[in-house]
């Protein structure tokens, strides 16, 4: 009997996973781990892990005796030490077709909220202040430039939806060429050009060593004072202290943030006091439909590995080379 541990029970209570894993002779243990030592205690004799937000560190992996796969509920794998997993011969899988519409819809919602000042006007009306003059200035969206940082599937969905509002689309992605873009009406540019020209900058890059704090003081200084920054990717892509200064001193007009460097944020974080920011609680991926689909998709990746197969959506493909060297 294989042992599979789901370490984020509060976020993904077991649903279809147990049935899918039972087909390959696996028993599912569902726990909510708090800290490395608890993860070690629960997983050191496991064959597979289902994880969402719980970090998977090298220290944890060194305790494993027979681990075969870490399957993440979602797209991003920044919570997993990929090199350590590869070194230990552990597959890492994700669900890359998760929540395209949800995150792209949320990005558009934040873009509309900050440019049209929806939340600020809502708060005024709640205070019995019925004065549209307080919204000044607002500019029409048609003809404005939306800059997408990274051009993966979610960003492409944002582009297609934003075109309907009349946005012109710029994109920065060092891994894309115009041939990759296909028929999507997007102009590929450098990051500097994108920041200087865009009226709204929307971030869609994964969090890696390369992208951590890729938006900091120099990049924010490049943006127009009338421009907005929207982040539905990962909080640490933005240097939050630099963003606070930029918003406080008027380097940029405002921001829409679904993600922050620290989650949940410190209640005393001064960023929370700014009136030119719209916040949401890292909920962009959520819909009833998406959260019903992703457990099954993650569990099927585990089942593939337990059957002795190479899983689909394998993130650390270098592990295959290691397996060949070790045989």
Image (cartoon, rainbow, N blue to C red):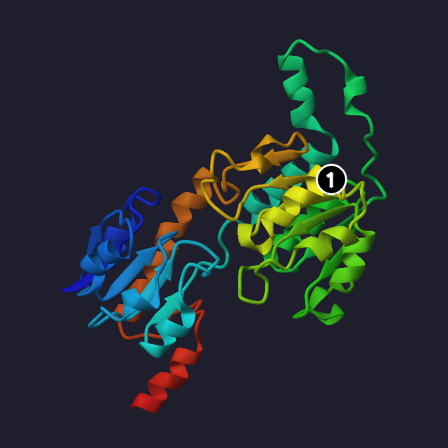
SS under mark 1: loop
At 63% from the left and 43% from the top, the residue drawn is 107
In this image, 54 relative to 256: left or right? left
In the displayed structure image, the side of residue 111 where residue 6 appears, left or right: left
- Name the residue rendered at 58%, 67% in the picture: 210
Q: Residues within 10 Å of mark 1 (few under 14, many from 20)?
A: few
Percent across and percent down for residue 213 are 60, 58
- The percent coordinates of residue 301 (x first, y second) are 35, 63
Using residue 12 as the reference point, say whether residue 109 is left or right of it: right
Placement of 74 over or under 182, stated as above or below: above
Q: Would you say residue 183 is visible in this rendering?
A: no
The quadrant the N terminus occupies is bottom left
Q: Is residue 87 above or below residue 249?
A: below
Q: Residue at x 42, y 59 (%)?
A: 79
Q: Which residue is mark 1?
A: 249
Residue 191's spot in the image, x, y percent? 74, 62
Between residue 320 and residue 196, name the one nearer to us.
196
């Amino acid at each position: 009997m294989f042992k599979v541990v789901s370490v984020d029970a509060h976020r993904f209570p077991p649903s279809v996973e147990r049935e899918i894993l039972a087909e390959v002779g696996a028993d599912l243990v569902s726990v909510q781990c708090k800290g490395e030592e608890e993860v070690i205690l629960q997983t050191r004799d496991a064959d597979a892990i289902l994880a969402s937000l719980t970090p998977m560190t090298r220290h944890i992996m060194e305790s494993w005796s027979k681990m075969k796969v870490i399957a993440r509920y979602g797209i991003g794998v920044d919570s997993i030490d990929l090199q350590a997993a590869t070194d230990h011969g552990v597959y890492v899988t994700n669900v890359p077709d998760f929540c395209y519409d949800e995150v792209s819809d949320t990005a558009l919602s934040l873009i509309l909220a900050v440019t049209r000042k929806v939340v600020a006007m809502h708060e005024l009306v709640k205070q019995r202040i019925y004065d549209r003059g307080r919204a000044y200035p607002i500019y029409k969206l048609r003809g404005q430039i939306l800059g997408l940082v990274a051009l993966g599937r979610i960003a492409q969905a944002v582009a297609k939806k934003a075109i309907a509002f009349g946005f012109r689309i710029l994109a920065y992605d060092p891994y894309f060429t115009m041939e990759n873009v296909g028929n999507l009406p997007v102009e590929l540019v450098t990051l500097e050009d994108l920041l200087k020209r865009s009226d709204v900058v929307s971030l869609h890059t994964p969090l890696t060593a390369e992208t951590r704090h890729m938006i900091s003081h120099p990049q924010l200084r490049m943006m127009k004072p009338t421009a907005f920054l929207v982040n539905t990717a990962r909080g640490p892509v933005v240097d939050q202290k630099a963003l606070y200064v930029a918003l406080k001193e008027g380097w940029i007009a405002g921001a829409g943030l679904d993600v922050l460097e620290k989650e949940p944020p410190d209640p005393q974080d001064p960023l929370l006091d700014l009136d030119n920011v719209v916040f949401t609680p890292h909920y962009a991926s959520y819909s009833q439909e998406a959260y019903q689909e992703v457990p099954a998709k993650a569990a099927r990746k585990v089942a593939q590995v337990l059957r002795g197969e190479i899983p689909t959506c394998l993130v650390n493909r270098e592990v295959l080379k290691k397996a060949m060297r070790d045989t």
